[in-house]
Amino acid sequence: MLFLVLGKGKTGSLVAEVARERGHGVRALDITENQNASALTAPNLAGVDAVIDFTAPEAAVENMRAVLALGGRIVVGTTGWYAHLNDMKALAARRGGGLLYGTNFSIGVQKLFRLTAELARLDDYKFSISETHHTSKLDAPSGTALTLKEIIHSVRPGIEVPITSHRVGDAKGEHIVTATSEYDTLELHHDAHSRRGFALGAVRGAEWLAGKQGAWEFREIFDQL
């Protein structure tokens, strides 16, 4: 397959590396090479099986619009743009494009999501979330932390679930879900040792998305990888 990776930052560079290791052709553009999605034209996307975006929220929206308007496929690992999600889903449907998005493409985090749903079924517990990322991460709380909160609310609507955000050095990503009662405390803890897990999930997601039409969240389909 041929993938176009948008973003040459820490995760984007790893995505390109992992894709090549898995035998795929890879092209990569940084933000300066794709200002306002200017490089995402029909000739440049010809033969591209999927675009993989790890840029910034505003750039990701522009990139999705350009790719989906041409009926292309795009995997979006960027977070912080979800106010536009319904518009992007509608565009994919109108133009026959494919969109795969997620707050976290780590398989380990997908298991954390499912365990959190189980934990939230406990009665008489209060829940909280802590997340730690690198100092250059733009959004806080992280998209993953917001997904964890959404999962708890899906089981226990309306309860308060405070999120504490930390930005420390080059932290790869740590999330802790805590359930506390009068008698004990339970914790679910995921600590990423490397960004490679996110990159591998994104590449496997792009492999899955190639040739498909529609819009999916990664946690809906990761069992199919």
Image: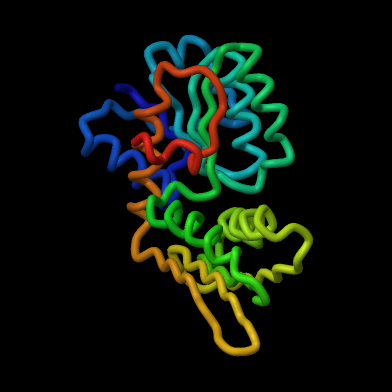
Quadrant in the rendering for residue 95:
top right
Q: Can the viewer see residue 32?
A: no
At horizontal 58% and vertical 72% (from top left) the residue drawn is: 130
Q: Is residue 81 left or right of residue 133?
A: right
Quadrant in the rendering for residue 46:
top left
Percent x, y of residue 204? 34, 36
Colour scheme in use: rainbow
Q: Is residue 151 left or right of residue 26?
A: right
Quadrant in the rendering for residue 93:
top right
At horizontal 49% and vertical 50% (from top left) the residue drawn is: 104
Percent x, y of residue 153? 69, 57
Q: Is residue 100 left or right of residue 146?
A: left
Up the image or down, 14 lies above or below 5; here it is below
Looking at the rendering, in which quadrant would you find the C terminus? top left
Looking at the rendering, in which quadrant would you find the N terminus? top left
Task: Give the camera-side residue of 74 and 217.
Answer: 217
At horizontal 42% and vertical 33% (from top left) the residue drawn is: 5
Q: Residue furthest front?
A: 123
Percent x, y of residue 83? 74, 40
At horizontal 67% and vertical 76% (from top left) the residue drawn is: 124
Q: Residue furthest bottom?
A: 183
Up the image or down, 186 lies above or below 69; here it is below
Task: Give the camera-side residue of 181 and 205.
Answer: 181
Percent x, y of residue 154? 67, 53
Q: Residue furthest right?
A: 158
Q: Can the viewer see residue 10?
A: yes
